[in-house]
């Protein structure tokens, strides 16, 4: 079989099978690398307050490695652009988030950031946003998905930044900030009955995508099968060559038997002396 495998065509086929196997192995490594989601940022880093304009920019998606970051920003509230987000719990009590557009100083395109200024139990408890130059410190969080249900006047079912951009008719960030503190001219802004929405950093857990791991194992099987298929084809070619050799050997043996039968039945052996014939 080794003689068959060393034929030029089978060597070329082996190189082709190994190339295919290499591609399959690389695909398997890629599937393994994507099976585990990125860890959220360490709490040691997210709890250190950083300027918003250094952390995140408008028009891009907020990834898990950036979310939960404590940020600071200066600018001014657009007092007319305030909405309430319903179905919000605070210590088991259902109420609303008060969200106001915040024009961030230095933001590209004069983009605004939705800021959760606090939680209220009744819409009438909402306090108008402060006017003038303000500073906000809070946690940067990803937006929620839009909810397909009719919204009441000034009340929305979810904090979806894409929806708020349409409501406020202004460019904005694809995220929102829950304010820990709002100051105007160095003094705390009036909060009234609003309670601070305190959101903790997400837990440091790794999510495993088992479907990706299954695909990775499949690619390994395919890589092994390509080499096995080459070996199987070589084995079949070797067996066929042995059958051909046996066939030709049988034909040669039959031809020898036919040649031995010629001569009219005269047995092979020592010729009979002529004297014996005369007698």
Image (spheres, rainbow, N blue to C red):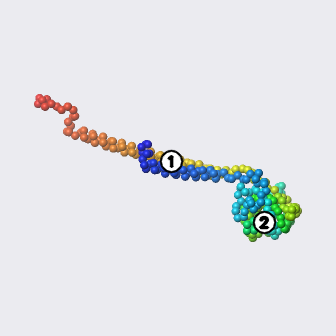
Name the residue: 75% across, 70% down: 169
Measured along the vertical axis of the image, is residue 274 above or below residue 158? Answer: above
Name the residue: 20% across, 31% down: 270
Name the residue: 22% across, 40% down: 262
The numbered mark at residue 103 is none
At mark 2, the secondary structure is: loop
Q: Which residue is mark 1?
A: 227
Is 58 or 107 nearer to us in this picture? Answer: 107
At mark 1, the secondary structure is: helix
Q: Which residue is mark 2?
A: 105
Measured along the vertical axis of the image, is residue 119 above or below residue 43? Answer: below
Name the residue: 16% across, 31% down: 272
The picture places residue 22, in percent across and down from the top left corner, at 54, 50
- Give left or right: position of 203 versus 234: right
Measured along the vertical axis of the image, is residue 261 above or below residue 206? Answer: above
How many residues crowd mark 2 within 10 Å: few (<14), some (14–19), many (20+)?
some
Is 10 or 107 nearer to us in this picture? Answer: 107
């Amino acid at each position: 079989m080794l003689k068959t495998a060393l034929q030029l065509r089978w060597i070329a086929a082996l190189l082709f099978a190994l190339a295919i196997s290499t591609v399959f192995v690389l695909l398997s490594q890629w599937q393994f690398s994507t099976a585990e989601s990125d860890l959220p940022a360490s709490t040691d880093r997210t709890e250190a307050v950083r300027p918003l304009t250094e952390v995140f920019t408008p028009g891009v998606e907020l990834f898990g490695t950036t979310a939960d970051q404590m940020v600071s920003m200066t600018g001014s509230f657009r007092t007319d652009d305030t909405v309430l987000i319903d179905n919000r719990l605070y210590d088991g009590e259902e109420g609303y988030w008060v969200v106001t557009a915040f024009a961030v100083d230095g933001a590209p395109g004069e983009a605004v950031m939705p800021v959760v200024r606090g939680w209220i139990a009744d819409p009438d408890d909402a306090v108008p946003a402060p006017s003038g130059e303000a500073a906000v410190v809070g946690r940067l969080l990803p937006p929620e998905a839009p909810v397909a249900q009719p919204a009441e006047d000034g009340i929305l079912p979810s904090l979806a930044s894409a929806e708020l951009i349409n409501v406020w008719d202004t460019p904005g960030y694809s995220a929102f900030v829950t304010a820990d503190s709002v100051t105007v001219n160095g003094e705390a802004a009036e909060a009234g009955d609003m309670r601070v929405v305190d959101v903790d950093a997400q837990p440091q857990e790794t999510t495993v995508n088992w479907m990706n791991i299954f695909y990775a194992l499949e690619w390994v099987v395919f890589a092994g099968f390509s080499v096995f298929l080459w070996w199987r084809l070589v084995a079949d070619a070797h067996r066929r060559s042995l059958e051909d050799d046996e066939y030709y050997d049988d034909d040669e043996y039959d031809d020898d038997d036919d040649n031995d039968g010629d001569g009219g039945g005269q047995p092979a052996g020592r010729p009979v002396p002529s004297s014996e014939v005369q007698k």
